[in-house]
């Protein structure tokens, strides 16, 4: 028989085991309670939804230009489209951070706090490359969050997300950091964000919400998930706070983000290439293409070089190089270490400015008939560097898009290059002005433009004059 003492001993052992196990798990209630008031729900409304070409891109090239506009679904009056996301307040006077894709194309942005206060928000600036946006609401004495040090994060650390998944207000979820510095190219095949990968449950509606460390500091902005079902499967990606703080500061100061540019095409180094190039292991970014006149060319970098360090930071994989270069302010001179013909060399390179971002997009700016003409587009000649980079010989560069007018309704953005309007090729500013004047109002017309170097066809319609 089990004696009374034995029962007490067993109970004590069980209690000790439970206590030891509990010590291994973080206590999150205070963190969530203290920071939830600064996390907001963002509701957006897009009045003019534009239908896009449903034909897959691989087949578009096979269709003669004269017929491509027929493949566009006929534009028709559609109901306003509402969507939602999350965000967080970074200053008591009403600055709010969220994802660019949460507010992209929105005509109205509304911010709701945990205490049910609601405010209309203005978009101060957006950055598509980092998927970040800065909003402003007219309010004072708002609760705020604190930025944390994402550079010191380690795989295995606990992190907490707060947001509005599927519209369920202020939900919290927890997990660990699964990996650091993940390279995920965007739709333009650009790669300027070293994402933090976590297994935190992130779902639609969490986008733009904060990722906290156990000190209650924001170390990331939840941005993407990998999923086959539309919901979380444990692969979530957050924008590091170190990158976000710089982007937000630039958006607040000038409404745009200036990034460093090197002017090289790169690839990974495999084991055989490493051996042939005199490396002990496959590391670095192999220069496979060099743009004439670029900062890399001017610094003496050559095709076949393997860049192993840039600005004193190690380049382990090719995807690390854009992360480092993009965060350097244009005009800065930085050291580069590379391998050439089996020998290490050291150079200095003056980083250039990434083309296509020299003018901010005027988000939520009031529409004006005095700006942008009939299409609501402010355009200019294409810089030579951008022509070389994208392989474009002619056209005009979109520098500003007026919301609510023909260009915005067609889905054009700042940085696009217009190559065709109607059935006429746009060779220069002079061509553009002449073509725009003669475009008929009230008719669907084809427009061809380049975005990130990739050609795209859509339709555009000028309202009745």
Image (tube, rainbow, N blue to C red):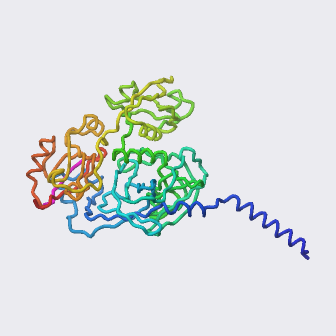
Q: Quarter holding the N terminus?
A: bottom right
- x and y, in percent, of residue 140 in the image: 42, 58
- x and y, in percent, of residue 149 in the image: 54, 46
- Residue found at the very far left of the displayed protein: 438
Image side of residue 31 versus residue 69, left or right: right
Res. 335 in view = yes
Q: Mostly what secondary structure, the magenta segment?
A: strand
Q: Residue at x 49, y 54 (%)?
A: 237
Q: Residue at x 44, y 62 (%)?
A: 40
- Residue found at the very far front of the displayed protein: 141
Image-quadrant location for residue 14? bottom right
401 versus 202 height, above or below: above
Q: Quarter holding the C terminus?
A: bottom left
- x and y, in percent, of residue 302 in the image: 40, 27
Give the residues in magenta. 443-449
Image side of residue 396 versus residue 56, left or right: left
Q: Nearer the viewer, residue 267 or 226?
A: 226
Total labels: the figure holds 0
Q: Residue at x 47, y 64 (%)?
A: 231
Res. 308 in view = no
- x and y, in percent, of residue 297 in the image: 36, 27
Residue 439 is inside the magenta segment: no
């Amino acid at each position: 028989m089990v004696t009374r003492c034995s029962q007490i001993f067993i109970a004590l052992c069980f209690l000790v085991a439970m206590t030891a196990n509990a010590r291994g798990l973080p206590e999150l209630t205070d963190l969530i309670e203290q920071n939830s008031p600064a996390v907001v729900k963002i509701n957006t409304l897009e009045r003019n939804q534009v239908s896009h070409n449903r034909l897959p891109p691989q087949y578009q090239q096979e269709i003669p230009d004269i017929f491509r506009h027929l493949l566009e679904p006929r534009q028709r009056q559609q109901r306003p489209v509402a969507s939602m996301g999350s965000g967080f307040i970074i200053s008591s006077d009403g600055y709010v951070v969220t994802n660019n894709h949460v507010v992209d194309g929105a005509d109205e942005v509304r911010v709701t706090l945990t205490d049910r206060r609601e405010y209309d928000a203005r978009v101060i600036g957006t950055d598509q490359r980092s998927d970040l946006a800065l909003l402003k609401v007219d309010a004072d004495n708002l609760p705020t969050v604190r930025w944390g040090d994402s550079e010191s994060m380690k795989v295995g650390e606990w992190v907490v997300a707060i947001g509005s998944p599927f519209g369920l207000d202020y939900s919290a979820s927890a997990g660990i950091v699964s990996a650091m510095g993940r390279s995920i190219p965007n739709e333009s095949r650009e790669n300027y964000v070293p994402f933090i990968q976590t297994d935190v449950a992130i779902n639609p509606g969490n986008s733009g919400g904060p990722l906290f460390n156990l000190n209650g500091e924001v170390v990331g902005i939840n941005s993407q998930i990998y999923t086959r079902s539309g919901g979380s499967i444990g692969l979530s990606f957050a924008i590091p706070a170190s990158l976000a703080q710089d982007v937000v500061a630039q958006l607040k100061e000038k409404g745009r983000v200036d990034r460093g540019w090197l002017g090289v095409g790169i690839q990974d180094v495999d084991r055989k290439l490493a051996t042939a190039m005199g490396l002990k292991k496959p590391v670095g970014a192999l220069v496979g293409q060099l743009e004439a006149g670029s900062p890399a060319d001017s610094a003496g970098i050559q095709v076949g070089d393997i860049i192993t360090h840039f600005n004193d930071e190690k380049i382990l994989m090719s995807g690390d190089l854009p992360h480092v270069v993009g965060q350097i302010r244009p005009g800065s001179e930085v050291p580069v270490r590379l391998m050439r013909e089996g020998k290490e060399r050291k150079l200095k390179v003056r980083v250039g400015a990434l083309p296509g971002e020299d003018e901010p997009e005027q988000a939520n700016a009031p529409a004006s008939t005095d700006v942008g003409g009939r299409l609501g587009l402010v355009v200019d000649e294409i810089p030579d560097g951008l022509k070389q980079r994208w392989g474009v010989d002619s056209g005009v560069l979109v520098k500003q898009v007026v919301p609510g007018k023909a260009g915005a309704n067609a889905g054009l953005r700042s940085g696009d290059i217009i190559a065709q309007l109607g059935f006429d090729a746009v060779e220069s500013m002079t061509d553009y002005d002449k073509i725009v004047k003669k475009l008929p109002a009230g008719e669907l017309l084809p427009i061809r433009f380049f975005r990130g170097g990739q050609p795209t066809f859509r339709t555009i319609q000028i309202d009745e004059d």
